[in-house]
Image (cartoon, grey):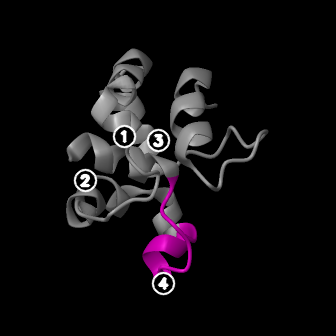
Amino acid sequence: MKDRAYTNIICKGFCRFYKEGREELHCGTYNFLRRNLTPNELTAFLKRPENAKKSPVPDFSRDKEIKEIVCDGCEFLMDGCDFREDGSHPPCGGYILLERLLG
């Protein structure tokens, strides 16, 4: 079950795939962020003026790193990640947030 605070920040805030009622689904970046940062830390990061103005579109500058530390172990990679499979869809919301954090 997803944690409401993380869901509000990561999924509702950044993920184009988010749908209410699918709380049993967790992407790899959601799990990574939940294990490594508190909701307060994520919120504080996003409230910084330099982060609040950033486009919600990823620039893929940290793609290799994100793939290695998160995506390679993500259940969706093995079960239908259209972003990694053929680039036909944008990455998950956690990817966008993690890219900002690493940047």
Q: Nearer the viewer, residue 40 or 55?
A: 55
Q: Which residue is mark 4?
A: 86
Picture quarter with the N terminus = top right
Foreground mark, 4 or 2?
4
Q: Mark 2 and mark 1 in contact (Cβ < 8 Å)?
A: yes
Picture residue at 48% right of the left edge, 84% below the top: 86
Q: Secondary structure at mark 4?
A: helix
Establish if 81 lies above or below 17: below
Query: What whole-number distance in Å separates the C-alpha atoms at marks 2 and 3?
Result: 13 Å
Q: Quick one: label 1, few (<14), some, or many (20+) residues within 10 Å?
A: some
Q: From the viewer's perspective, is residue 97 above or below residue 85?
A: above
Q: Which mark is first along the chain, 1 or 4? A: 1
Of labels 1 and 2, earlier in sequence is 1
Q: Which residue is mark 3?
A: 30
**Would you say residue 100 sits in the magenta stretch?**
no
Tag 3: amino acid: Tyr
- Looking at the image, which residue sits at the far right? 21
Q: Amino acid at mark 2?
A: Ile
User: What's drawn in magenta, residue-wise?
Assistant: 79-92
- Could you tell me how far apart the alpha carbons at marks 4 and 2 are, in whole angstroms? 20 Å
Task: Judge left or right: residue 80 versus residue 50.
Answer: right
Q: Residue at x 33, y 36 (%)?
A: 51
